[in-house]
Amino acid sequence: MQEVMSDEMLELIAQRFRLLSDPMRLRILHQLQGGEKSVSELVEATGASQPNVSKHLSTLRTHGLVRRRQEGNMAYFSIGAPFIFDVCNTVCDSMKSEWEQRNSLLGQFNNA
Amino acid sequence: MQEVMSDEMLELIAQRFRLLSDPMRLRILHQLQGGEKSVSELVEATGASQPNVSKHLSTLRTHGLVRRRQEGNMAYFSIGAPFIFDVCNTVCDSMKSEWEQRNSLLGQFNNA
DNA sequence: ACACAGGATGACTACATAATTATATTCTCA
DNA sequence: TGAGAATATAATTATGTAGTCATCCTGTGT
């Protein structure tokens, strides 16, 4: 990070995190990690309603996180911002390491 | 990410991102990146009200993102989860590269 | 042309939460 | 002990937004 962080910059960064702060959107992105998918495929995979999935996709697309490709009647979506993978992996790793750390502490108690 | 993502796991990940999805919290964390700071220092640095800063710090602490150390009358806070740096850097880098990409496209137009 | 499937959108509801105000608590210092 | 500084914590308000329902649009197949 830089020394001075402008208000607009902070707002943009917060916005990106906000896009990732919803379980359903994470679920959709997680599905898209396996490759391009149609809306109905995402509806089935996530268990959410079709309008709900469409709305989330629209939000993600507005901010460039997914791409849309139309083919006939179907709309296919795919990941549009590779940084998502890095960010999610970082968070997942951090949670995993904290989890293991907690478990190892528990182990010490149990062995004492 | 794993193949199957449980609801609880997704909720936890989303929660972490939600903590980072507020400009004021980002500003506080950014200040703490320069080292431990007292609440009043953070109040001055961020320009927010004291109760507001305290509340954000409390939220961040509840989820382990900052640590608290009390000394006399003062409360000193510091970063408690190093993954924050990685995540923020990743997002900042992504924004920077997208920005530069946009600028280079503009350059092509101008030079044409 | 018609019926239907895939998808998008607007209106609405319910809930979460950021900020403010006022107040409480705890420590320091004279 | 009394005053004031540093911090925390309700209570309240206002705003954002996730989800649903109904509806619309657009292709496809018959």
Image: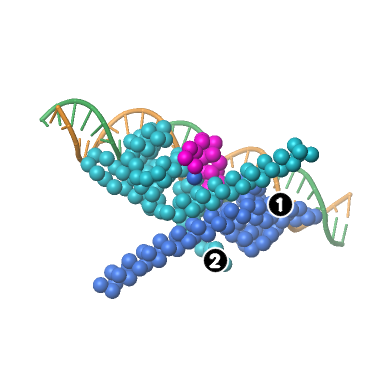
Chain colours: A blue, B cyan, C orange, D green
Above or below, A97 relative to A111: above
A13 and A31: which is toward the camera: A13
Q: Start and end of the magenta stretch?
A: A2-18
The tally of labels here is 2
A74 and A17: which is toward the camera: A17
Horizontal and vertical percent position of residue C21 = 36, 28
Is the Cβ of the residue at disc 1 closer than 8 Å to that at disc 2? no
Q: Secondary structure at mark 2?
A: loop
Q: Residue at x 42, y 54 (%)?
A: B82
Quadrant of the rendered image containing residue B103: top right
- The residue singled out by tag 2 in the image is B2
Q: Is residue B99 magenta?
A: no
- The residue singled out by tag 1 in the image is A68
Quadrant of the rendered image containing residue B46: top left
Instruction: Please check whether the numbered discs 1 and 2 fall on a single chain.
Output: no
Of the residues shown, which amino acid type is indicated by label 2?
Gln
Q: Disc 2: which chain? A: B
Horizontal and vertical percent position of residue A3 = 47, 40
Above or below, B57 relative to A82: above
Q: Is residue A8 magenta?
A: yes
B80 and D21: which is toward the camera: B80
Q: Main secondary structure of the magenta part?
A: helix
Q: Disc 1: which chain? A: A
Seen in the image, is B10 located left or right of residue C9? left
B91 and D28: which is toward the camera: B91
CA separation, marks 1 and 2? 25 Å
Seen in the image, is C1 located left or right of residue D18? right
Q: Circle 1: is it few (<14), some (14-19), or many (20+) Cα within 10 Å?
A: some
